[in-house]
Image (tube, rainbow, N blue to C red):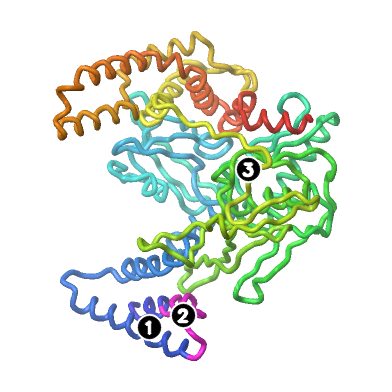
Amino acid sequence: MKQKIVLVVAALFCCVSHGVVGQEDRGFEIAKNLEIFSNVYKQMNANYVDDVDPGKTIKVAIDAMLASLDPYTNYFPESQMEDVKLQLLGEYGGIGSLIVQRGDSVYVSEPYRDLPAAEAGLMAGDRIVAVDGQSTAGKTTADVSAAMRGQAGTQVTLRLERDGKQFDCTLTRRAIKLPNVPYFGYVNGDYGYIKLDEFTTDAAKHVRDAFVKLKEGRPSMRGCILDLRGNGGGLMNEAVDIVNIWVPRGTLVVETKGKVASKNLKSFTTQQPVDTEMPLAVLIDGASASASEIVSGSLQDLDRAIIVGQRSYGKGLVQNILPMPYNSQMKVTVSKYYIPSGRCIQAIDYSHRDEQGRALKVPDSLKTAYKTKSGRTVYDGFGIEPDVEVDPEYMSNIAVALVQKFLVFDYATQYRREHKTIAPASEFEVTDAMYEDFCKYLHEKNLSYNTVTERVIKELREVAKQEKYDSAISVQMDEMEKALAKEKEDDLKKHKAEIADMLKAEILTRYYYDQGRIEGALKTDPVVNKAIAELGR
């Protein structure tokens, strides 16, 4: 078995080494380095003081080797195939619930609508005590998630704790297909809105279906918003088909170029579009990557949509999944992609690294200007820059503390158990009375948190003491701390709008799942509102 594992590494090393050294010496260099690696492993296995786990050790070696290339080239043993399926297809065998770790315990954070966890009555805030009789104490969310996943049709028994009482719940696992379009609807009257979370299988079909339903449901629709914020990408063919919804058949969307000639491909739209005239806005942010950038970048290059939000991530690399021995797989970066203007938006150059081994960003001096279909100037090398930029909103210190201490989460859990129903997601609001009740709840919990200003004052005291200035400025620092403490007392008032939005989102999730959270946030979303303003011009 150990020899077979070494052969797997040899095959991988051969794939990675191919083309690195000169043509004449390549064969010798490969053979030499594989011999060295093989002997290192043999000597380690024979002489190391403790027993060596061959699978674990070789996996570490493979991971380290691939990490020297880029973060997207990975090896997956058979035990991680469910994770691969989830990445590519948005599908896994399980119960359909998000979980969260709090200290040494793991809790249900959000069951998915119409899936086993929700159907069995699991609720956010339930503590998962055991899975199939195995205690979860001290386990991570990854450990508990792995234990709950399994083949569709098999059963798993959870011991849960709710309101101090424990009970068992047996669920039948199902093939869980996460919705790539969790919500679509109308905003501000006559504007369609489609939220796309992932580019998994059938993403384009679901976006197309959503757009058609929006048009048919409201013939007066004046424009549509495609929300790709937080969307890390996925299947490239789905991206091409999504662009095809709004551009004519036969339009070049993306071209891939790599070392292997067979990976050099041009992808054109192949279907009749749904609508090539309706005003379209695409929302992006710093977490919009890969396929999200193909869609937003190509629609920008073709002057078919206005891009609103913040600059995207900048991932212009394409991966293929390659089968490996023993039911394992390898994801390999095989090419770069180029959108219609000819630009590649890859932001980081993994082939060049600094002295600490960190990959370098493409410098401004090497960025090249390109032209869109109508002649507007766009640039390569740093993601997709929005046509209309909206400054990101950053959480206040008190909001961060409320999230980290699970106080919003726990209040929403308590609220759900005390109120059987609430208004529809589009109408629900956190009233002044509700907010006042939340403030009382926080007072009972003795909320405390540190601000950056407090940390700076503390550091200043330490430096002043070292430099023997502390006695001279101690009075001023005392006054600063008192003034700051007084200001912090008003934080719940100063940041009421932000905290109320957080409460609203968490409470809506308890009743209407992810769909309700999305719908409820639309009215006050500054990026959505900016997109509507631009579409209405």
**Quadrant showing the N terminus:** bottom left
| Disc 3 to disc 2, C-alpha distance | 38 Å
Residue pictured at 41% horizontal, 17% vertical: 491
Residue 389 sits in quarter = top right
* CB contact under 8 Å: marks 1 and 2: yes
**What's under tag 3, amino acid-wise?**
Leu
Q: Nearer the viewer, residue 189 or 55?
A: 189
Taking the view exactly as shown, the residue that stands out farthest to the top is 433
* Residue 527 or residue 373, whichever sits in front: 373
* Residue at numbered disc 1: 34
- Which secondary structure lies at badge 2? helix
Check disc 3 and report its element: helix, strand or loop: loop
Residue denoted by label 2: 14
Counting other residues with Cα less than 10 Å from the Cα at mark 3, is it few (<14), some (14-19), or many (20 or more)?
many
SS label for mark 1: helix
N-term mark: 1 or 2 = 2
Query: Which residue is drawn at the image coordinates 19% and 21% (left, top)?
Result: 474
Residue 178 visible in image: no
Mark 1 and mark 2: span between their CA atoms?
8 Å
What's drawn in magenta, residue-wise? 10-24
